[in-house]
Amino acid sequence: MVESRSAFAGPQDYFALLKPRVMSLVIFTALVGMVASVADGASINPGLAAASLLAIGVGAGASGALNMWWDADIDSVMARTLTRPIPQGLVQKSEAAGFGLLLSALSVALLALASNYVAAGLLAFTIFFYVVIYSMWLKRSTPQNIVIGGAAGALPPVVAWAAASGTAPTDAWILFAIIFLWTPPHFWALALYREGDYARAGVPMMPNVAGEASTKKQIFVYAIILAIAGVFPYATGLGGVVYLAVSSAFGAGFLILSWRVLKSPPRSKEAPKQLFAFSIMYLFALFAALLAEDIYALYA
Amino acid sequence: MPDPTESPTLEARKKRDQRSLAIALGLASFMLVVFLVTILKITGNIGGAP
């Protein structure tokens, strides 16, 4: 008897639909948003906080599964995404869609139960924005796809802040702004050394629409704005001196590597690769500094 | 890694059992989380009752 490949799918293949690495970054930034909210005076039971973070993480995973359902055709022609469960034939498109929809509904319902309707509404909007606005509409139609679509990835700390406090004050939106401004240079650095991949898939990323030189200039401009926005939490009191030191040092590093990208020879992959790797460390370092300061303030 | 001595049907059945077990565990975990969240909510509200 000849079985289809999907008959050999294990639980780990369905877990891969949730984009675990993206999910872990979402949970981390959400945790920082929640702890900052508590440090700001909000109060939430630790068990309910954990359930809320779980709901936010599952919601992010659900949007990942729905994105893989919608983008199955382009995932199968890009080297970076070829090994995903749908292009491998391990999971059917319809199964990924059903899985994503079910988890979306359960995550929003759980967040409403564990925290409040503001947070649940924001989570539902985040999933909608990522799947419908970014994946279905912007990704294949404009090189500004990840600029606007980046809002979905930037919302988790706001959702978590709302989960703890029921509100989304300016400080929550500063965290949003940092991730939002970080997204274009992060993804354009990736697109610079994966340009062929995106061009083959017909995805209008900045390098294969505006050209390499223009993309490098835009990366540098975003790096300047990001380095400034990165120290904003200190100005509003959200971050302290440790945060100021970390955000200044990493902001300078981001600027230097973006400058290297700008000055790198055409088709050079090394500088964009370095910037891409550093950009992940940048976001982690800034949010970890905020988390450390808030935990110290709460328990010291 | 599939066992080369095993027929594809047996391997497929093993994977199906794993998927079924994962669904069962997922549902049980969700029920447990909802139960615990409900209990935490109720306990948190007892003191605030008029």
Image (tube, coloured by chain):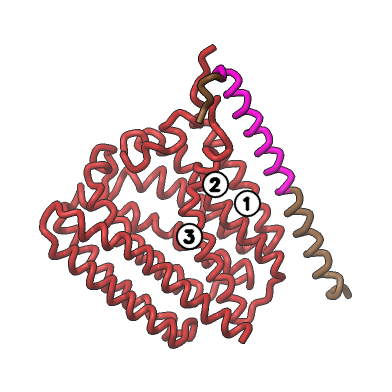
> Which disc number belongs to residue A107?
1
Q: Amino acid at mark 3?
A: Leu
Of pointers 3 and 1, the one earlier in the residue sequence: 3
Examine the image and state in which quarter residue B40 appears: bottom right
Q: Amino acid at mark 1?
A: Ser
Measure the C-alpha gap from mark 2 to mark 1: 8 Å
Q: Which SS class for mark 2?
A: helix
Residue A170 % position (x, y): 49, 76
Q: Chain of mark 3?
A: A
Q: Nearer the viewer, residue A115 or A264?
A: A264
Q: Amino acid at mark 2?
A: Ala
Categorize mark 3 by other alpha carbons within 10 Å: few (<14), some (14-19), many (20+).
some
Callout 2–callout 3 Cβ contact below 8 Å: no
Q: Supply the letter of whichever chain is red.
A: A
Q: Which residue is mark 2?
A: A62
Q: Nearer the viewer, residue B40 or A81?
A: A81
